[in-house]
């Protein structure tokens, strides 16, 4: 790791941020985060920009990608434990073990999000072999010290399953371009090169889940912008200001360089009152004014859809393996319509709809029989 400290700082206890670079878990280096690390150090933080295990095995699929996320997240936890160990022993870095934050960009943001929310043994995906790969804490070092963190900074990251976000989990600040084609802003497939890997959920979808269960999650959307590249300083000033504002509040301080949060992501809005994302009865999906209701959810396979003023010109349904199992025979509708998927087996499915205004959304639903 590269460790950034405020020049001439004589404070005996300082907040810590552990940051991770992007690069699709293939490439990248800790120096890619030098700008934000330097700027946060100027504000009084100790910042550790880490390297972590890279590489996605073959075949490139959802299993190999989740393994890459798993390994990298374990390495980030070891970094946090390193500083807790230092605080309890040599105290070289003079960090406050109650004020440890994590964050990252792109793959680093994905790491931070999974670090915070994939935090229970019951949530571990079945594709993760904990005997071979290690459990939630991993075997990367500094055992015996806590890896808990106070909050996270998510720069164009995403999560594999929003159900892992639960009431009482860490607060999060998020920034992302709504035209991001590498990490979806809402819910859609992520690609590595030309390979369609898996559906993941970006800022917009995570914000809906967080709002639904009471996680404080200020967001900023870079309208009309894409993903950027590792080390790119695009929008860096806004990122620093928003992250600073958010972290000051997490420490009980009053921000001095405030920014008006966008906090109006352009995608899913869940209206159900239950905190469980596996028990939604009605889901209303919005993309910049395009609204559609999907119910019941879960269903026995017969799902009704109602659109608002815009028309839906196409709709496709995919199973969890990415296989298309249904394509709508209609080309335009406004009135309620029933989609019959009763011939499909029980499980989770993803629906992708396109409106006549070229707005696209993806949402998931369950079929249970």
Image (tube, helix red, strand yellow):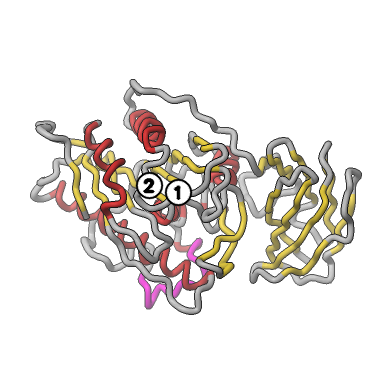
Q: Is residue 239 left or right of residue 314?
A: left
Image location of residue 252, percent across then percent down: 33, 27
Q: Quadrant of the C terminus?
A: bottom right
Residue appearing at x 80%, y 55% in the figure: 314
Residue count near mark 1 (Cα–Cα under 10 Å), binned few <14, some 14–19, many ≥20: some
Give the magenta part as a residue range: 123-134
- Give 38 or 67, whichever is nearer the viewer: 38
Which corner quadrant of the image does residue 335 belong to?
Answer: top right
Image height of 237 relative to 125, above or below:
above
Which corner quadrant of the image does residue 315 belong to?
Answer: bottom right
Q: Secondary structure at mark 2?
A: loop
- Give 252 or 350, whichever is nearer the viewer: 350
Residue count near mark 2 (Cα–Cα under 10 Å), binned few <14, some 14–19, many ≥20: few
CA separation, marks 1 and 2?
A: 6 Å
Image location of residue 223, percent across then percent down: 56, 37
Image height of 78 relative to 285, above or below:
below
What residue would you read off at disc 1?
228
- Find residue 41 and name its label: none
What residue would you read off at disc 2?
232
Residue appearing at x 67%, y 42% in the figure: 270
Image location of residue 267, percent across then percent down: 65, 43
Residue appearing at x 32%, y 31% in the figure: 251
Image location of residue 213, percent across then percent down: 56, 41
Q: Is residue 252 left or right of residue 124?
A: left
Given contact means CB atoms under 8 Å apart, are the residues at marks 1 and 2 in contact?
Answer: yes
Q: Secondary structure at mark 1?
A: loop
Q: Is residue 342 left or right of residue 19?
A: right
Q: Quadrant of the N terminus?
A: bottom left
Residue 16 lies in the magenta stretch: no
Q: How many marks?
A: 2
- Give 332 or 146, whichever is nearer the viewer: 332
């Amino acid at each position: 790791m590269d460790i950034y400290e405020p020049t001439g700082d004589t404070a005996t206890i300082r907040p810590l941020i552990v940051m991770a670079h992007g690069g699709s878990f293939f490439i990248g280096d800790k120096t890619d985060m030098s700008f934000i690390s330097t700027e946060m150090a100027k504000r009084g933080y100790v910042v550790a920009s880490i390297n972590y295990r890279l590489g996605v095995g073959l075949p490139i699929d959802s299993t190999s990608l989740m393994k890459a996320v798993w390994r990298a997240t374990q390495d980030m936890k070891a970094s946090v434990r390193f500083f807790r160990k230092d605080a309890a022993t040599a105290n070289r870095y003079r960090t406050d073990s109650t004020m440890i934050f994590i964050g990252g960009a792109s793959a680093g943001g994905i790491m931070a999000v999974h670090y915070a929310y994939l935090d229970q043994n019951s949530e571990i995906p079945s594709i993760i072999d904990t005997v071979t790969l290690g459990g939630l804490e991993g075997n990367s070092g500094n055992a015996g010290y806590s890896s808990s963190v106070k909050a996270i900074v998510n720069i164009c990251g995403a999560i594999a399953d929003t159900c892992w976000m639960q009431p009482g989990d860490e607060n999060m600040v998020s920034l992302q371009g709504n035209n991001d084609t590498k990490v979806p802003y809402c819910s859609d497939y992520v690609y590595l090169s030309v390979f369609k890997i898996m559906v993941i959920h970006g800022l917009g979808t995570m914000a809906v889940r967080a709002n639904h269960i009471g996680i404080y999650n200020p967001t900023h959307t870079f309208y009309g912008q894409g993903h950027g590249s590792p080390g790119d300083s695009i929008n860096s000033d806004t990122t620093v200001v928003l992250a600073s504002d958010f972290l000051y509040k997490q420490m009980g301080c009053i921000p001095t360089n405030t920014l008006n949060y966008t906090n109006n992501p352009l995608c899913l809005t869940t209206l159900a009152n239950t905190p469980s994302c596996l028990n939604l009865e009605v889901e209303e999906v919005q993309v910049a004014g395009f609204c559609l209701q999907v119910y019941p959810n879960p269903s026995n396979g017969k799902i009704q859809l109602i659109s608002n003023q815009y028309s839906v010109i196409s709709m496709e349904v995919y199973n969890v393996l990415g296989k298309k199992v249904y394509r709508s025979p209609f080309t335009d509708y406004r009135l309620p319509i029933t989609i019959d998927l009763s011939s499909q087996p029980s499980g989770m499915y993803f629906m992708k709809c396109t409106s006549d205004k070229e707005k696209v959304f993806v949402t998931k639903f369950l079929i249970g029989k």
